[in-house]
Amino acid sequence: MSFTLAIVGRPNVGKSTLFNRLLEQRKAIVDDVSGVTRDRQYGVADWNGKTFNVIDTGGFVPGGEGAFELEIAKQVLIAVEEANAIVFMVDAATGITSLDDTMAAVLRKSTKPVFLTVNKVDNPERQLEANEFYSLGFDQVFFIAAASGSGTGELLDAVAALITEDASEETKEMDALPKFAIIGQPNVGKSSLLNALVGQERTIVSDIAGTTRDTIHTHYNLFQKEFVLIDTAGIRRKNKVEEDLEFYSVIRAIKAMDEADVCLLLIDAEKGITAQDMNIFSLAVRKGKGIVVLVNKWDIMPKETNTAKEYETKLKHKFAPFTDVPVLFISAKEKTRIFKAIEIGLQVYENRSQKVSTSKLNDVLLKAIQGYKPPVVRGHPIKIKFITQLPTVVPSFAFFCNFPDDIKQPYKNYLENQLREHFDLTGVPVRIFFRKK
């Protein structure tokens, strides 16, 4: 079993700052507004040669007024259940609060190791005041300043001491699994799809657009299929991004695309494809990601004999020139065809990672080139002699010829279509380069 560390505590004690420090990157949204992190989110950290998962949770507000507080409390308890050890964070600047007491009572019942971590201890005076936290009754107490990193080494040493070699290896293997990002505009049903696939309330679902602010990683291991699902905050057009937080979430969604191998682009069936969906689609193509288009809420659409066929033709017309994309009509709410979506996603992942042998490429494509030669340039025939696949993540092919700069787009398109016809590249952007032989 891999090893998981959960960071819990009331809002605004610096959990996300510590999370970002452990991951050595800005993954959690950090802001001075309390309750910024709503869902629990995951990352992978390394310390002293040990690799482990870290969960950052929303601030714990037991029985809070708002619906979100209740949901966050539920998420914290799930995180504690999932974890092997817990970092319970408190704030030296404010001292012990009633929320800290409540949380301490919950954690003392847990059989898991708890590291009481007093944050914002950044001067000798605070160091003295921080001693009051011993009264919470935990054996292991650490004084740190997450923003500067002081004291975090000792905390990590204590965590690393609990991790076995096997657990560390398994975490590394998980990190190597295929990654699917669920992308799309706010409120198209991304979180509902994730919850339907995983079969548990993994993300906070509500009808308020923009509920998911962070990207969330979920390990999926059912029906002999294993991969990581990344749920992203909805991507909106620039002029709609009112709060700074919204802006961060858009950046986060774009970063999730970078992390993913395959993007599952969700479109609202009723609204059809909008300019914003097209932007998201083009961005995924530019980044060279595998793409599966999922038309969600299909259950509420009025249908005739050819509704789906016509809808798909319209979509592909918009996607041109990259039309070799799987389109699937689903309902996250009714769980219609959602597992089919995963099968197609895994197929696209395979297509994207395939390596075509040079001999096979040349056999197939040189024949195709003989059948339809490149146009003559300034009285010179263009001769393509040799083709090879480049060692890149995105399927890229180099064609060696005598006049690489003179090959025009229509002929490039012809070669790409030939590649797609003979090798399974559905859902995958292809890159073609011409080089001087």
Image: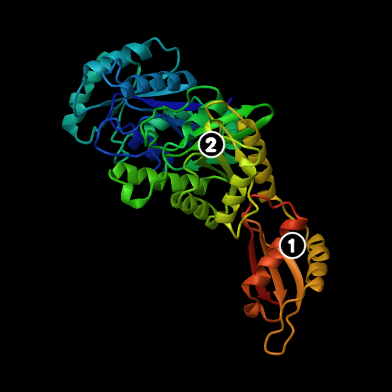
What's the residue at 66%, 45% (across, down)? 348
Outermost residue toward the front in this view = 304
Q: Earlier in the sequence, mark 1 or mark 2?
A: 2
Q: Nearer the viewer, residue 65 or 394?
A: 65
Relative to 362, does residue 53 appear above or below in the rendering?
A: above
Residue 15 as seen in the image, left or right of residue 348: left
Residue 168: image location, x then y, percent? 56, 32
Q: Which mark is residue 418?
A: 1
Q: Amino acid at mark 1?
A: Gln
Frontmost of labels 1 and 2 is 2
Relative to 287, does residue 408 appear above or below in the rendering?
A: below
What's the residue at 67%, 36% (across, down)? 343
Q: Amino acid at mark 2?
A: Asn
Outermost residue toward the top in this view = 109
Q: Nearer the viewer, residue 182 or 7?
A: 182
What's the residue at 68%, 81% (across, down)? 403
Relative to 176, does residue 325 appear above or below in the rendering?
A: below
Quickly name the residue at label 2: 296
Instruction: Name the image quarter holding the N terminus.
Output: top right
Residue 106 as seen in the image, left or right of residue 44: left
The quarter of the displayed image where residue 196 is located: top right
Residue 25: image location, x then y, percent? 41, 44
